[in-house]
């Protein structure tokens, strides 16, 4: 694969948690959320800032936005805002709190006014399309992998296919216990896929993805997936961010496969944030 820069972001953006809490709305269809425990807003903020610092240490520019207490899931911005070259895409969110996020003027203004990106606004259309939560993208090949859950519908999948200018979108059903594709799989710098076949309704769909990566697939167990091992992200061609929770649960065989793929893993503590049902990848919006 030619390293033409398309497969990793030129910068990233994050939204800091403000008054961190568990959303009652998104907890209805996110089984990864821990609704039976208390949360520490200051610890969540500290962990989030440590994530931003680690990304910056890897030489990737970081843009940070302030969170809003009325929208507790806004620390997971990649579901609402995403980019391709010179284009901002705004998602069509399922839950009302997240629909409010899509109307944020600061993030829109940064991309539209400062960066002069065209805006494709799916929030005004009749669909559900939670962007790179529902859609995992092989950026270099322009291939999307869309796991169908209540967080995306068929109109949304088609709208994202067009908005992200993809050559192919492969849609498949995830099991009812899943809410976002980016928890069960990640494409790392367009050369390796990390994937949990147990999350797929049809095993053949997972097999097809594994085959497409021609021996560059890292298969994770359900236990590793539940620890957010699939919710990792390559921010450079060599550097992969992963939560410490996931790192601690990786089997030796999984770790060996990732290391043989020539990636350096950078674990960051995210356990407080993970109570809200997302991890490292969910916190990072990519700028292309």
Image (cartoon, rainbow, N blue to C red):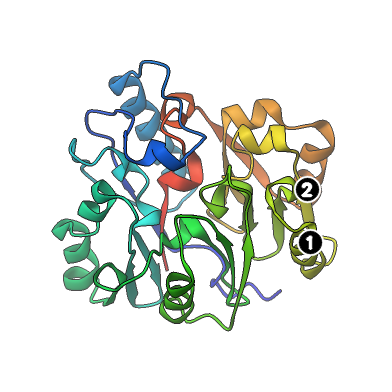
Label 1, residues with CA under 10 Å away: few <14, some 14-19, many ≥20: many
Question: Up-down: is 281 above or below 138?
Answer: above
Q: Secondary structure at mark 1?
A: helix
- The residue lying toward the viewer, choosing from 182 and 203, is 203
Instruction: Name the residue: 42% across, 69% down.
Output: 288
Measured as percent of width and height from the top left, residue 42 is found at: 29, 21
Measured as percent of width and height from the top left, residue 208 is found at: 78, 67
Q: Secondary structure at mark 2?
A: strand
Distance of label 1 from label 2 (alpha carbons) = 8 Å
The residue where tag 1 is placed is: 210
Label 2, residues with CA under 10 Å away: few <14, some 14-19, many ≥20: many
Q: Is residue 50 visible?
A: yes
- Marks 1 & 2, CB-CB < 8 Å contact: yes
The residue where tag 2 is placed is: 219
Question: Up-down: is 259 above or below 21?
Answer: below
Instruction: Name the residue: 75% across, 43% down.
Output: 220
- The residue lying toward the viewer, choosing from 227 and 288, is 227
Measured as percent of width and height from the top left, residue 26 is found at: 37, 41
Question: Up-down: is 224 above or below 42?
Answer: below
Residue 190 lies left or right of residue 39; in this view the side is right
Quarter of the image where one finds residue 203: bottom right
Residue 140 lies left or right of residue 60; in this view the side is right
Quarter of the image where one finds residue 67: top left
Measured as percent of width and height from the top left, residue 229 is found at: 64, 39
- The disc at residue 134 is none
């Amino acid at each position: 694969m030619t390293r033409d820069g398309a497969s990793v972001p030129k910068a990233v953006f994050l939204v800091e948690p403000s008054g961190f809490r568990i959303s009652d709305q998104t907890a209805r269809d996110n089984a990864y959320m821990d609704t039976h425990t208390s949360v520490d807003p200051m610890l969540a903020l500290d962990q989030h800032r440590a994530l931003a610092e680690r990304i910056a240490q890897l030489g990737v520019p970081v843009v940070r936005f302030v969170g809003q207490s009325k929208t507790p899931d806004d620390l997971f911005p990649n579901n609402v805002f995403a980019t391709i070259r010179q284009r901002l895409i705004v998602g069509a969110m399922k839950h009302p709190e997240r629909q409010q996020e899509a109307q944020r003027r600061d993030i829109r203004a940064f991309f539209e006014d400062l960066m002069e990106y065209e805006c494709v606004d799916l929030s005004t259309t009749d669909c559900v399309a939670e962007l790179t939560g529902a859609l995992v993208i092989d950026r270099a090949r322009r291939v999307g992998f869309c796991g169908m859950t209540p967080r995306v519908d068929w109109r949304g999948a088609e709208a994202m296919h067009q908005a992200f200018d993809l050559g192919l979108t492969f849609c498949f059903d995830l099991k009812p216990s899943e809410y976002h594709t980016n928890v069960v799989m990640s494409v790392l710098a367009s050369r390796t896929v990390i994937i949990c076949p147990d999350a797929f309704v049809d095993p053949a769909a997972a097999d097809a993805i594994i085959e497409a990566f021609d021996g560059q697939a890292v298969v994770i167990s359900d236990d590793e997936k539940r620890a957010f091992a699939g919710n990792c992200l390559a921010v450079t061609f060599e550097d992969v961010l992963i939560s410490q929770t996931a790192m601690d649960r990786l089997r030796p065989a999984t770790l060996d496969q990732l290391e043989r793929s020539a990636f350096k893993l950078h674990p960051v503590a995210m356990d407080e944030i993970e109570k809200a049902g997302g991890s490292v990848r969910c916190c990072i919006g990519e700028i292309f």
